[in-house]
Amino acid sequence: MQAKIIEKCVNKTELLPLELKGHVSLVKAVVDIKQAIMVAGVSMHSDAETLLLERGSEQENLWGINLYLKKSRDDWIEYDSMINLRPWQDNDSRGVDNPAIRQKIREIVNQLVKEI
């Protein structure tokens, strides 16, 4: 599977080849909420996290999500990743506990990925 760095708007259909093998319509991604970019199409969120860190992203700005491409825009983002476990950032779950950060992630993803 080839990771895709998304810095400019793409169509949702462009993510279909990035689906996690064996999981129809699921694409794992990591969003940098400071740079407003995303890496999608990895088997593990930590792979995307590493790629972004190597490109200069800062750990506290990286959040792992799952995109369910066949769900509606309201329900297609799942905030669930081991990389989100950050007690030092007051995030004690695999989700994204801070509503403001969840909203920022949603805004970035919706700007970067458009419907057909």
Image (tube, rainbow, N blue to C red):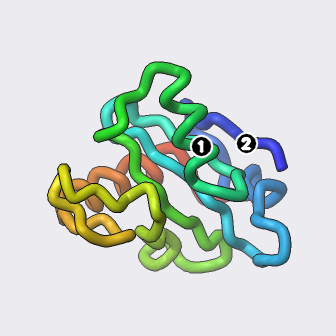
Is the C-beta separation of discs 1 and 2 under 8 Å? Answer: yes
Percent across and percent down for residue 35 are 38, 29
Percent across and percent down for residue 95 are 35, 70
Is 42 positioned to the left or the right of 80 in the image? Answer: right
Rendered view: 8 above or below 3? above
Q: Residue at x 59, y 79 (%)?
A: 71
Percent across and percent down for residue 112 are 52, 44
Task: Report which residue position mark 1 lands on.
Answer: 48
Q: Looking at this view, is 68 or 61 the one in front? A: 61
Label located before the other in sequence (1 or 2): 2
Q: Residue at x 65, y 69 (%)?
A: 69
Q: Looking at this view, is 77 or 113 the one in front? A: 77
Percent across and percent down for residue 49 are 52, 42
Quarter of the figure with the C terminus: bottom right
Callout in the foreground (1, 2): 1
Amino acid type at circle 1 is Ala
Residue 16: quarter of image: bottom right
The secondary element bearing badge 1 is classed as helix
